[in-house]
Amino acid sequence: MRSIPVRRVAVPLAAVLVALLLTGSGAAPRSPSGSGLSADLDRLLADPRLTGAAVSALVTDAATGEVLYQHAPAALLLPASTLKTVTAAAALDLLGQDHHFTTEVLTAGPRTGGTLGGDLVLRGGGDPSLLPADLEALAGRVAASGITEVSGSVLADASRYDDVPLGASWAWDDQAAYYSPQISALTLTTDSDDDVDSVRLVLTPDASPGRPAAVQVIPPDAPVRVSGRVDTSAAGGDNTVQADRRPGANEIVLSGSLPAGSTATEWVAVDDPARLAATVFAAALARHGVAVRGGVREGQAPADAVAVAAHDSAPLSALLVPFLKLSNNGIAEHLVKEIGRVRSGSGSWAAGLDKVRDFLQRSGLETTPARQVDGSGLSRQDLMTTSRLDALLRFARGQAWFPAWYDALPVAGDPRRMVGGTMTDRLRGTAAEGRVHAKTGSMTGVDALAGYLDRADGHTLAFSILFNNFVGPSPRPVIDAFVLRLASDRAVDPTASPTTGVHRSTHDWEAALG
């Protein structure tokens, strides 16, 4: 079983930065390629937490490609979310920084006065950032066009992409998790984090212990049913709230308890994203005085349907920020299917990944074998090498899209959520703070980091670290000590972890390891 990350509300981290035990303080600083570097890094990778684990690491000069350190760089290992660096680079190259996703409203039938004699179509354009407020605005434009009644249905059209909702080898027991959403060309998110196909449940405890907590569903018009209950417990107790969804249905089952005086928020991925979006849109139409007689159904718009309103997403360069900073799986998979649709006319994983492979080959980045079956790294069929990640890191620096890609990577120790992202609480207060732009990756038995370190001496290093198949305590402090050694030129004791804590409101499974 994989660990399920805590993503209720951001919990203040009580952990305090532990003092680093640095050895050799009287010695002259060594250059990053000095003879002591390899020995120091070898010692770090011999940490007992990695006993029996598979380990790969590669450090190069980002400008020259000079190898400064390597440990099994050709080993094929699970990359987890570091795979998103590949997906993001391919999307920028194949779609362009200015690419956007368009959601349309179309009429399918004749109009007589204010009555539409047919369906009103909500056609998805693959937008992973579509909000209820955007649907509200579209409903307002429909009303402004003079339509007051629809004799047919709100037709949910998700035909831009195929109808395969889940990636290869995604875990069946993750289907309710916000980080494992169903992928559809028509979907909805509830906030700026862009967690597609998810609803939020805000729970407020009762004034009296033992009484059920109140539950608010966001958006309130979502076609879900909530069963079970969360009991109010004494103030100061543990939050044990659990929210699950019955497979193949939209019944969300609650259990556990919530201490008095607190609140909790749960994100749950729902079944049938297109119906979710269309149902919320239908409710918005009603608020704007447009009556829909035929309810909501799913299908494809006829060829002669007429557009009456449209909404464009932010450009891809802007969507990269929540994608990489927060390690958003839904955006990753939308990008793969969009690549397939734009480049080959088929909005499928197979078509999109085929074009990603073409990009890698054309760019000379297939330095070692690898396997990519999704865009996010959620699948345990994905395999990557640090050698290939390093090739990508160095290649990207020469591309016109590099600033957008680089700026979207999480920044070590930066407390601003949309800057630090999944690196917010790592390496804070150290020589690496603010100098590391890197993509995290973690799932049960996997921890990884790949990116850049801007040293104080002006050198930029590219580094990739993959840890697989470990058990027991998380080896994440070893990764951070590894990076700190690259920044500080002095040996680091990984038992004095430079990690201040685990970010508890991140995306996919980034908070799974504590």
Image: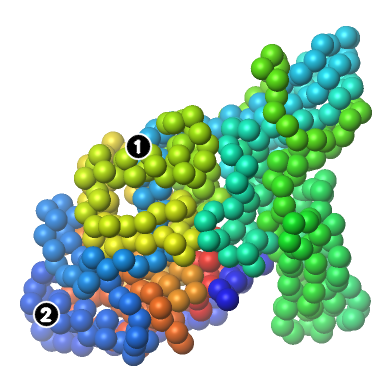
Q: Which residue is mark 2?
A: 36
Foreground residue among 120 and 440: 120
Amino acid on which the number 2 mark rests in the picture: Gly
Q: Is residue 374 left or right of residue 64?
A: right
- Residue 199 image label: none
Please determine whether, in this image, residue 6 is positioned above or below residue 119: below
Foreground residue among 361 and 150: 361
- Give residue 61's position: percent from left, percent from top: 16, 59
Q: Which residue is mark 1?
A: 93
Q: Is residue 99 left or right of residue 248?
A: left
Amino acid on which the number 1 mark rests in the picture: Asp
Judged from the image, the secondary structure of the residue bearing numbered disc 1 is: helix
Query: Are there few (<14), some (14-19), or many (20+) residues within 10 Å of tag 1?
Result: some
Instruction: Tell me which residue sits at (68%, 61%) in the image.
Output: 176
- Give residue 361's position: percent from left, percent from top: 26, 43
Q: N-terminal of the two: label 1 or label 2?
A: 2
Please determine whether, in this image, residue 365 is positioned above or below residue 37: above
Q: Quadrant of residue 112?
A: top right
Query: Split into 4 quadrants, where in the image is the N terminus?
Result: bottom right
Instruction: Tell me which residue sits at (31%, 87%) in the image.
Output: 47
Instruction: Tell me which residue sits at (47%, 52%) in the image.
Output: 374
